Amino acid sequence: MIGRRGRAAAALCLGLLVVAGCRRGADSGRLADGTPVVLISIDTLRSDRLPAYGYGAVDTPAIDALRRDGILYERAYTPAPLTLPAHVSLLTGLLPPAHGVRDNLGYTVSGARTPMLQQRLAERGYATGAAVSAFVLRGATGIGEGFGFYDDELEVAAGRGLQGIQRAGPATLERVRPWLRSAAGGPFFLFFHLFEPHSPYQPPEPFASRYAVAYDGEVAAADAVVGDLIAELRALGVYDRALIVLLSDHGEGLGEHGEDEHGLFLYRSTLQVPLILKLPGAARAGASVAHPVQLVDLAPTVLEGLGLAVDEALPGRSLLAAPPEPGAVAIFAETVFPRLHFGWSDLASVIVGDSQYIGAPRPELYDLVADPGQTTDLVGREPELAAELAARLGAWERELAPPGAADAETRRRLAALGYLGSAVIADDAALPDPKDRVGVLRQLREAYRRFERADWEGAAAAFAEVLAGDPGIEDAWDLRGQALQRSGRPELALATYLEGLRATRQSPRLALSAASLLAPAGRLAEAAELAQLATGHDPALARVLLARIALAQGDLAAAETAARAAVAVGDPRPGPALALADVLLAAGRPEEAEQALAGLAAAQNPEALLALGRLAAQRQRWDEAGSLFERARQADPDNPLVAVNLGLLALAGGRVAEGRTLLERGVEGAPASFEGWNGLGMARVQSGDLEGGIAAWERALALRPRADELLYNLGLAHAQAGRPQRAAEYLEAYATRSASPQAARAREMAAELRRRAAAGR
């Protein structure tokens, strides 16, 4: 028997399960026209960490009060243990393979292709507003489409820590209050998202002091914000007549099955979520529903309740419909996170009645009621049930389209939230079972923590350990390479990227990273080949690099063509405009270069402001350059490249001590800055620190081996320091490589230095 009961009933609708789940029973949930709808989503909240579900170690008075007025669903499940796919399912009523958003990274939703709840309600005359608390749900993913008001404003500048990836719940509530007050007089739909208790767990006071377990402290903090929102709804006279839904998008591992957070597995700890439905007038207050339900049931609940048509293809059914026959509904879930991020097998799950079957390289079967901790796998004991559920799961169409390219800053922010890793999709090999690799994920997170702390040496070593056990993780190769670059070891970084290319089947992302180091090393043909490989992965950045390679080769026409092609992609990153400006400047068209950067400068983009400042400095417009650099500092105070450029400007103005101080600070934060080390070498020499200048210039040469002028400077500096043999080597290298008229003079000096060295002078 399926779920140990109801096999006959289930058999009657076996052919319909994947499409419609033996659709809707009689609807008993008709709402008055214009009923306000309030959706409260508390991210990463396990149902079994709430008093409403029997947990006693945390106080949640607001949620408890809502539960007393509403219906509690004892067993509600998400279709994906990831924030963006789960919320898109919530709003579309579709499972992830149908709406197409399979991960937090590289996927977007289209309201034209898959209409969302807010669009349907807006068509009905509802005011629609939302405020979200995390970068994951930024409007650029498409999830904000159809909202008249969508507030996702976080601190967007790089290096802002948690403020750049999440927003405290009270701040999100304050952002949406004005809209809510303006909309409260008519029909409205509010989507309100809290990111507490998502990791990293850092509850505010007084909750941090009150709770020894930080996760519980964040749950209590989220409850306080819910209480403030409900108080606002009461004050506006909305609470009693509103349909209010409180739920979570997914749970949290909290160490169960070796999973600390979420996304990797499909156990109850991350699939089961709280769900409370408060009807107008508190109808059915205090009721409980024991049969399994799912997040995709929300859209049909609201649509049917308001008398709107519901697409029969939607897999959910109204939460207010009559209970289904036992075993009649199959609840599906998936995670492609292990496949996309680590190159491990993706997982899929089906829940029917009390039973959950998890499709994996080593499949699992559990009785969720008798064994909620899922400690006893029943596959071997109940092979017939396992086979039947496997057949149901196998009927679910789950073809995976690869994710789109994501820029480095987006990856950094999601990694800071725990969404680490990236892997090349492999279709022709047996992929590892995530159960066998969960320890690697912990290693990877520790390596990333070192990276975030700017412990470049430690991070490089830690990523090397990860790769020794699992060389297929693209992110580990890339982050190890970045750590080596930032520690001033570009040769090792390049070697890492090239080794990673071999290990990941020519990953376009690693190809782009390798090309970015091959180009300044003078290996332009190799760089161009790898940049070309990456044009399908990141067309804007790959073409930017192709433009810079052509510029280095002296082919201004090809450089301009590539730069303009990069701009035409329409990518919002500053790289294309910066590259085009550099090409135009090299072509002797500085006015056009300034025009190319004008839009970025108006938006206070720090990279564009720095580029315009450098352009002004090259034209000896010193005051203008200083003003632009100061604007860059205001836009991004912690950016070390601002200090580098201000230092170079001070040096050009003869303020050597000031320049040296700024450059020392700049290269500390940006050890891969060629301009910083080169300028610091000059500042140190001019201030009488010859050995320090030599050390700085040698760091600069390691970063850009084709910088011939450094060979000349180092030759003169070593000669002045009394090392004629070393000086001669640098000068000879310069004479061999440079076409400058100075080459002949360098050759003569080198010969004289060798004669002196031979004579012992």
Image: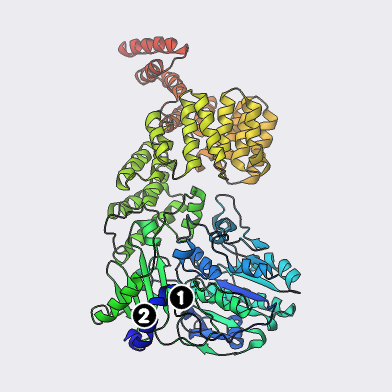
Disc 1 + disc 2, Cβ < 8 Å: no
What percent of the width, then of the height, locates residue 721? 42, 21
What percent of the width, then of the height, locates residue 554? 48, 22
Quadrant of the rendered image containing residue 381: bottom left
Q: Amino acid at mark 2?
A: Gly
Would you name the residue on which mark 2 appears?
Answer: 373
Q: Is residue 542 above or below residue 682?
A: below
Badge 1 density bin: few <14, some 14–19, many ≥20, Cα 10 Å:
some
Q: Is residue 495 left or right of residue 139?
A: left
Q: Is residue 584 above or below residue 367?
A: above
* Residue at position x 45%, y 80% in the image: 22
Q: Amino acid at mark 1?
A: Ala
Quadrant of the rendered image containing residue 1: bottom left
Which numbered marker is on residue 20?
A: 1
Quadrant of the rendered image containing residue 233: bottom right
Q: Nearer the viewer, residue 168 or 98?
A: 98
